[in-house]
Image (spheres, grey):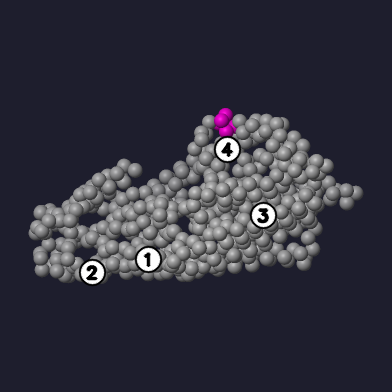
Amino acid sequence: MFKCCLLVTLLCFIHRGNSEEADCFPSEWLKSVSMSVKISKAGFHRDLHYRVQWSKTEQEVHALLVQKLPSGVYMDEYQLDTLRRDTGLEVLLDSKVDVEAPEYLSSGFTALVFLSGRREAVVPVHGRYHRPSDSSKRVKVELESPRLLLRSEQCERGVAVDAPCTASNHSICSWTEILDLEDHARVSLELPVGDSSMVISVCGVTVLTTVLCCVYLLRNIWKHGSF
Amino acid sequence: MDAWLCVMFSVTLLIRLALLCFGVYQDQNLRWVHCGKLLFLGSDLLSALLLFRLLVLHCSARSLASVHCSMWLFNPLTMAVSTCGNAESLLAVLIYPVTYALPVALSLVGAPSRGRGLIQNLVWCFSRDLFLEQCSSASPFTACEYGWDFLQESSLFHLTHRDIHHNFSPYFSMLYVTAEHHWSVVLVLVCFLLQLLLLLLSSLAFCCSIHTAVFVRFNKVCTSQMPFSRSYFLWYLCLLTLVLSRLTLSLRRGLGLLLWFVGQELWLSHAYYLEFEGCNSFALIWIAGLLFLLINSLILGQIISHYRPAEAQLKKTD
């Protein structure tokens, strides 16, 4: 709880940097930085594939992706915890996520994906149940491009953004935000929704069927039960 | 019975504390990985032992009792649930005494009588004597001072819990499409009343298994997912093996039980396409859910009509 509060407070400091980018990374090298996001699988359970690339450098570079997610999807913190132990995936969520709540009772959240020592990560994301609709059978959920932040151990000067150093969230580091990336990072997913025009028939037939089953069982109990 | 209830709840609390300790120790020392699962596997064995002893006690031959216990112990569902880390088999050993308080009380104060007629029997179930009996058995809750939160999480949760995600309950589709309508509360009440109506039975041993089957089948939520949700099927599966030895079902009628698997597979196939392929199969899941309810009711009805109480069995052998 304390960690979440701390993270939320710190996320307020993750603002768009001013025009002065850090001198840590040479501007020529910064032009080589690129990012891509892809979404795989189908249905309610998807994987987000993040990949960040840059040209060779002597510095040890750490990357952090700040991904804002809408209320139509969620990440499971317990699953992320298991993945952290098993595969080393480092993802930090800024708030508690209710995995059972539907989309219309949920709010968006932010996930911090740490790419220390690696340049790609696969993060599972799940779709929420949306409101039934009488006009369409599917709903589209759009994920905006994540913000890319870089940091180097060798550089401590002139920075733009404060964020946790690692997923353990014990300390704050200064990161450089990479702006003007080519927009290959917007993804979307489609989820099926129920048909709200069938409300009356669904309720009627369901209640009728359950009442019939109830009557059948009561009749059997009354006839064969030992009283 | 009050002391028994107190011990039951104390033990479940102890189990939760033990799992918490295992978990903390596991984080620090990987040698104790899967301690909780070992505990659940142990409870599977204990459940089988209890079933065997009960069956032999109720005049089943030892060989037949072994066969029935094997159906529980070597059931893939039982094994999968425990090894995935669900405590359902533990609940089978110490199961929720609250749901059985009613049939236990009915047996103790005198079961409903056929001579009274159905309506009079239902009214009798809410009589003063039975009410006092229920209150005295409910006193352990306050005596043990577990508080409202514990009561809510362990028992009342099942009365109010609504899960709009697809599950085996026949009410799933209805609750999903009416989730935002203020009159859905009425539907929830109807679901509960139908469930309550069927739970008013007599005859203790037989009752517990039918009682549990009815509770699960007519519940607003019925999942079999692991490991993060309950496997409701296990709740009645172990108890059903207790009554199998007393059923007079012929082989042909017994084969009708395969219908259960047909109904389950039909539901599962549509649920798979919804969840993992993104197909809009909500309507098909609704129909499969109702069909599964019909099949379960038919099977339950057959079990009820072909069950021979122990007294009838003894008279036959004399």
Which residue is identified by label 3? A211
Q: Main secondary structure of the magenta part?
A: helix
Both labels 4 and 3 in a single chain: no
Q: Judge whether residue B164 is colored magenta.
A: no
Q: Nearer the viewer, residue B152 or B287?
A: B287
Q: Quadrant of the N terminus of chain A?
A: top left
Region rendered in magenta? B140-144
Type of amino acid under label 4: Phe
Q: Which residue is more in the foreground, A203 or B243?
A: A203
Counting residues from the start of the chain, the first of labels 3 and 2 encountered is: 2
Q: Are marks 1 and 4 on the same chain?
A: no
As helix, strand or loop, the secondary structure at mark 3 comes to helix
**Residue named by callout 2:** A183
**Sequence-first tag of 1 and 2:** 1
Query: In the rendering, at what x and y percent does residue B102 appear?
Result: 68, 40
Q: Residues within 10 Å of mark 3 (few under 14, many from 20)?
A: some
Question: Disc 2 versus disc 4: distance between alpha carbons?
Answer: 57 Å
Query: Which mark lies nearer to you, 2 or 4?
Result: 2
Instruction: Choose mark 1 or mark 2, whichever is in front.
Output: 1
Is A116 in front, or is A202?
Answer: A202
Q: Within 10 Å of the Cα at label 1, are there few (<14), some (14-19), or many (20+) other Cα atoms?
A: few
Q: CA distance from mark 3 to mark 2?
A: 56 Å
The reply to whether callout 3 and callout 2 are in contact (CB within 8 Å) is no
